[in-house]
Image (cartoon, rainbow, N blue to C red):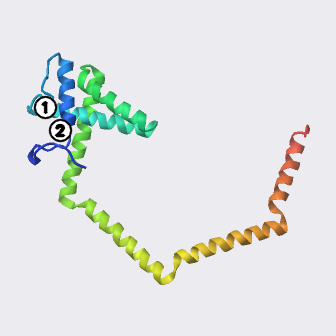
């Protein structure tokens, strides 16, 4: 996960910040004719932009989880607009949720930088896959499992053909149902 970081040059979301700055300027009744640069490099403006982006992430995640991708995108845009333009409780909630996402993202980034969990997890899965492949090559577990499943299915079919279990079960259920409901 990569968050905007002024120490690394141009933020990953610089174009989003530019859009957000234009939206904020519009909402505040000011003009921002230069869309190629953010309206302000002031720390509070960047914090507000990050809160808007975080609100968009929260809205998108909730919409995606509840309904699907189209609603997720719409919910993200709506949350960003509310965070950018609404000065009431809804805007405060959207900005607070955005701030929480940004803070969580920064914390995750610090933990990742310190412990390299992504690389360690990738290595663990790679080693596990390699070990499983070596065991399978030696013991042919996948082939044996396929053969066993095929044999079980074949034997079950033979048993059904010989004893007609499904047919007898269906007839039994039908007889019980006719005794419960005498109209049958």
Tag 2 residue: 14
Residue shown at the point (79%, 66%) measured from the top left: 160
Tag 1 residue: 38
Above or below for 91 versus 110: above
Determine the CA span between mark 2 and mark 1. 8 Å
Above or below for 97 versus 114: above
- At label 1, counting other C-alpha atoms closer than 10 Å, the crowd grade (few under 14, some 14-19, many 20 or more) is many
Q: Residue placed farthest to the bottom in the image?
A: 138
Pick the front one: 54 or 73: 73
Callouts 2 and 1 close, C-beta under 8 Å = yes
Q: Quadrant of residue 80?
A: top left
Q: Position of residue 164 (x, y in %)?
A: 83, 63
Pick the front one: 100 or 79: 79
Residue shown at the point (89%, 44%) measured from the top left: 178
Task: Give the SS element for disc 1.
Answer: loop
Q: Position of residue 135 (x, y in %)?
A: 45, 79
Q: Quadrant of residue 180?
A: top right
Q: Position of residue 35 (x, y in %)?
A: 15, 29
Q: Position of residue 181 (x, y in %)?
A: 87, 39
């Amino acid at each position: 996960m990569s968050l905007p970081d002024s120490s690394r040059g141009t933020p990953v979301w610089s174009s989003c910040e530019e859009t957000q700055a234009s939206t904020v300027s519009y909402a505040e009744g000011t003009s921002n004719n230069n869309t190629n640069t953010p309206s302000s490099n002031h720390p509070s403006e960047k914090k507000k932009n990050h809160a808007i982006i975080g609100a968009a992430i929260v809205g998108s995640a909730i919409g995606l989880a509840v309904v699907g991708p189209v609603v997720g995108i719409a919910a993200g845009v709506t949350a960003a607009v509310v965070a950018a333009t609404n000065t009431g409780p809804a805007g405060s909630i959207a900005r607070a949720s955005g701030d929480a996402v940004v803070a969580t993202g920064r914390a995750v980034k610090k933990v990742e930088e310190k412990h390299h969990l992504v690389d360690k997890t990738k290595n663990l899965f790679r080693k596990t896959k390699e070990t499983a492949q070596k065991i399978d090559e030696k013991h042919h577990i996948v082939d044996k499992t396929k053969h066993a499943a095929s044999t079980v299915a074949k034997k079950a079919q033979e048993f059904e053909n010989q004893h007609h279990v499904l047919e007898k079960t269906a007839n039994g259920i039908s007889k019980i149902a006719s005794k419960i409901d005498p109209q049958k």
